[in-house]
Image (spheres, helix red, strand yellow):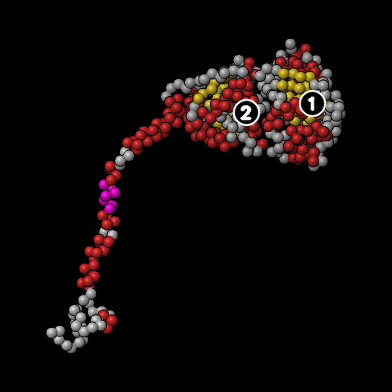
Amino acid sequence: MKFADLGLSDELLQSVLDAGYDTPTAIQAQAIPSVLMMRDIIGIAQTGTGKTASFVLPMIDILAHGRRRALMPRSLILEPTRELAAQVAENFEKYGKNHDLKMALLIGGVQMGDQVKALQDGVDVLIATPGRLMDLFERGKIMLNGCSLLVIDEADRMLDMGFIPDIETICSKLPPNRQTLLFSATMPPVIKKLADKFLSNPKYIEVARPASNNSNIAQHKIHVSTRGKREALRHLLRTDNVSTAIIFANRKTTVRELAKSLQQSGFSAGEIHGDMDQNARNAELQKFKDGAISILVASDVAARGLDVKGVSHVFNYDTPWHPDDYVHRIGRTGRAGASGRAFTFVTSEDAEAIANVEKLTGMSIPVFTLEGAEAAPAAREDAAPRESGRRERAPRGEKAPRKERAPKAAAAEPVVEREEAPVREARAPRIQRDEPRPPKDVLTELPSKPGEWNGPVPGFLSVSAL
């Protein structure tokens, strides 16, 4: 099947061919005709399957005829992250170049002024994150009653990020007779309930997971200690023919520290995570796309929707907490028919997480053994302290009598004895020898009965002692 068989306009087909595509993916082949027929859609598909084009292409043809009105977008696409929203906007620019369509991008982290001005001029396509859209709606800067087409993308990610209440509020403000397209990697009960409430007789489309059938991605897991991760990563970056790589970590602090460590080791590395403002994130992404840096360390904020051609490797520095994130992460390589490699570092604490990943993907990820001298420290680094600890504990058990320490205790005892009673008794004679000195008050020292005095006669008494 070719794109020409899907019912798209000639102008749109030319844009697709100019972009280098002529054969649709599975999700595109199934979704595009149904969207053009104005049906509601539930699409279960991962990123990397061509899902974005499956709704962008038919939307361009649907919106080709119509009139724009101020503050009233004709269609709305909801995305969970700024990066994914920007990615969808790029798709509209690329495929809609032969159509007179205006688009606005509403995302956080950028000034509202330009966004509000675009809405006032009227837009055909509004791409937004729920938070910024709700903010402008509550300020009275946007009206949703003229929106005839709604796309909820990455619905399960919306659920993870706590956006479902916002989405329900937004849906309630839209016309009830609209067309709704919902895409999700999985269908948990909350998303199923959302679909049942806001979609009308939808067509259900599900495509295979790329992690289970994409033979272009060579997947490996590496058993390492927590402290051995960095050495293992540096070894692979130097020896596995890495041209460009994305390294994923679970925490923003890990992203920052790892990027700095790689830079200090001489690698051309950048970082992207949620604590960076939008301009800084865009700048890092652009440097990576332009080749100014060859390694991008990222949190999962960049795992979905990040489309960079020619990524040769993906490294899961941390095993992802959610198995779906594994699929999205490794999907950054092996795209558009290219080959790629994905390595996942697994520590003893990650046993359950990697088991969930393998259960989800339906495959046992092969174990990769690091070779060469660099691999040994990763294993020894954690083992050496345990071995030395056992050697230290054993001698302490053998020295229970502590014969060598006994002399130290004996040497200390004489010091104590000099302070005890026998020493004070030895000093008593010195006190007695001091007594012949004349008392301060002689009268108090004289005996009460004459003849009982045995001491020396005071010098002031002019009497003889005889």
Mark sitting on residue 322: 2
Report whether 75 appears left or right of 455.
right
Residue at the bottom extreme?
462
The amino acid marked with disc number 2 is His
The answer to whether 65 is drawn above or below residue 260 in the figure is above
**Residue at coordinates 25% horizontally, 61% vertically from top-left?**
423
Mark 2: secondary structure: loop
Could you tell me which secondary element the residue under label 1 belongs to?
helix
Q: Is residue 18 placed above or below 262 in the rendered structure?
A: above
Q: What is the number of the mark on residue 196?
A: 1
- On screen, 170 above or below 459? above
Q: Considering depth in this image, is 375 or 403 the residue closer to the camera?
A: 403
Query: Taking the image as drawn, is residue 272 in sight?
Result: yes
Residue in the foreground of this view, choosing between 276 and 183: 183
Q: Residue at x 59, y 34 (%)?
A: 251
Residue closest to the eye, 400 or 41: 400
Q: Give, as a three-letter code, the residue at label 1.
A: Asp
Q: Quadrant of residue 306?
A: top right
Q: Quadrant of residue 214?
A: top right
Hey, which residue is sitting farthest top in the picture?
1
Point out the image quarter for the C terminus. bottom left
Of the numbered discs 1 and 2, the one sitting upstream in the chain is 1
Residue span colored magenta: 407-413
Kindly report the distance in space between the C-alpha atoms of the residues bearing marks 1 and 2: 25 Å
Check if residue 217 falls in the magenta segment: no
User: Which quadrant is home to the N terminus?
Assistant: top right
- Tally of numbered tags: 2
Our reading of the magenta stretch's main secondary structure is: helix
**Residue 150 in picture, x, y percent from top left:** 79, 28
> Where residue 45 sits in the image (x, y, percent)?
70, 21
Tell me which residue sits at (64%, 34%) in the image: 281
